[in-house]
Amino acid sequence: MDDNKYNLITTKLVPVLVIGLAIATVSVAVEKCFFDGQDVHSYMLFVLYAAFNLLVGIATIAGFIDYVLNSLENRAIINPTDPVGRKRKVILYMCGIIILLWTGLCITYSLDSSDCDDGTTSPPSAPPMEIFQTERDILLSFFSGANGINWENNEKWNESEISVCEWFGVSCSQSGQVTELKLKGNNMFGTIATEIGLLTALSYIDFDSNSLSGSIPSELGNLDSLRHLELDSNRLTSTVPSELGSLNDLKEVYLQENNLSGDMPEELCARRDYLGGELDTLIADCEGGGNEFGGEDIICSCCTTCLRRKT
């Protein structure tokens, strides 16, 4: 091979191939994570890390090849008059291409769609069977404590072969976790089971217009997803639990027409929208003059509406 061909390979063709393969490798990695998920930033960092190791690897191999060639020349095994410089370049570039191809394959095939955060393009994975069984037990505990046998509508409740997602008033996420309990005006009386606080995906509670008694469970403060809490028009007593103030996403709370007393917790007031929180609706019996059960009204300076139920 003459000098012109060597120069063409070492100065034009091989660099173009190396740069093209590098761009293709990064593009494939980004495209795969972009369409299969959202966490592109993490995988770009991974690609950069791989590229750094690639450069280190090429430098190491280049040094080794250079050492071998120098040893061969010194021992007169290779004719020193040969165009060793050009051969070295060809060998080093070819090694770089091989390493780059290998690295590209590793990056591409390691970016499986299961490794990407694909919350927008793929349905969420189903929770283990233990969660389904636990949520069934929780709902049955609530059913028992609220005298479910006498509800106006208890369709499919407590039927062992039916998913809880098909029970009356129950809604679920795509993965099958309970997200809503809508049992307004359903002739419920008794207490609200504390186990309700274990329904980790619950975002909406509507027990309006029933005859529930006892206190509001402080365990409701464990429902990190809760946005809507409607407990008005019942016979609930005691104070409003301060644990409700730990719910960052809580947007609406209806507590009027009960027998609640005491001060509205500062922790809950701190969630009001004008203080930077999400809570834009907070209604309670705080107008003054007592409620229909003979108790004192709630003292609330942060409520959006204060009511007094007329007897």
Image (cartoon, helix red, strand yellow):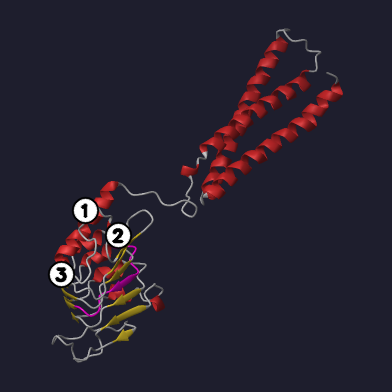
Q: Is residue 89 left or right of residue 151?
A: right
Residue 195 in percent (x, y) is at 20, 60
Q: Is residue 53 left or right of residue 211?
A: right
Q: Nearer the viewer, residue 63 or 298?
A: 298
* Residue in view at x 21 percent, y 53 percent: 160
| Distance in Å between CA atoms under marks 3 and 1 | 19 Å
Q: Is label 1 in a helix, a strand or a loop?
A: loop
Q: Nearer the viewer, residue 129 or 94?
A: 129
Are the residues tagged 3 and 2 within 8 Å (C-beta)?
no
Are the residues tagged 3 and 1 within 8 Å (C-beta)?
no
Residue highlighted by disc 3: 150
In the rendered image, the quadrant that contains the N terminus is top right
Within 10 angstroms of label 2, few (less than 14), some, or many (20 or more) residues? few
- Looking at marks 3 and 1 on the same chain, the residue that comes earlier in the sequence is marked by 3
- Residue 166's label in the rendered image is 2
Q: Which residues are magenta?
A: 223-234
In the rendered image, the quadrant that contains the C terminus is bottom left
